[in-house]
Amino acid sequence: MQRRADTGRTGGPLYTPQERLRRDASPWTTVQAVLAPLQFVVFLASLVLVVRYLATGEGYSAAVISVVTKTLVLYAIMVTGSIWEKAVFGRWLFAPAFYWEDVFSMLVLALHTAYLAALAAGVGGPRQQMLLALAAYAAYVVNAVQFLIKLRTARREAPTPGGRAGEVTA
């Protein structure tokens, strides 16, 4: 396996040629391409329900179900993303190309899990639990932006039919 410096700090290519081939051949790339937008749609729906509950006091059950659903989708994308990283980079997590995204993903995962724990244990009232969900969602937005930046970088680095990188715009 070819070694390279941490691309998150050096500005080097996101993928080596071998990693790009593994990424393109992996079925987990497709799984991630499906789960990421699905998670975003679930997030938007849940955000509306949580904000509605916080603003009006109505729809608590729907808000809870939506946050639990969002968290389950997050778990699915985290597990399959780890499998994807192993297939592409040979590491389950914290591959240099996605190190900071993975670090922040751990915060996102911790906040969503804290919401589930608070809900299950009855810690805090419904309002406090929904505020915890909003904190988890704020972290998720930051993490989603990190991954969108990486996606854009990958597209810019993609070789064109002529074989040169950098000519594809996102």
Image (tube, grey):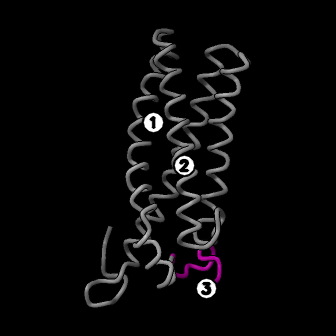
Question: Residue under circle 3?
Answer: 1
Q: Which of pointers 1 and 3 lies earlier in the amino acid sequence?
A: 3
The residues tagged by marks 1 and 3 sit, at their Cα atoms, a distance apart of: 37 Å
The amino acid marked with disc number 1 is Phe
Question: Residue under circle 2?
Answer: 142
Q: Assign a secondary structure to mark 2.
A: helix
Q: Nearer the viewer, residue 166 or 46?
A: 46
At horizontal 57% and vertical 43% (from top left) the residue drawn is 75
- Identify whether 136 is placed above or below 165: above
- Identify whether 114 is placed above or below 129: below
Residue 6 among those drawn in magenta: yes
Callouts 2 and 3 close, C-beta under 8 Å? no
Label 2 packing within 10 angstroms: few (<14), some (14-19), many (20+): some
Callouts 2 and 1 close, C-beta under 8 Å? no
Q: Assign a secondary structure to mark 3.
A: loop
From the viewer's perspective, is the residue at label 2 or at label 3 nearer? 3
At horizontal 66% and vertical 64% (from top left) the residue drawn is 94
At horizontal 47% and vertical 76% (from top left) the residue drawn is 22
Label 3 packing within 10 angstroms: few (<14), some (14-19), many (20+): few
Question: Residue under circle 1?
Answer: 43
Q: Which of pointers 2 and 1 lies earlier in the amino acid sequence?
A: 1
Which segment is the magenta one? 1-14
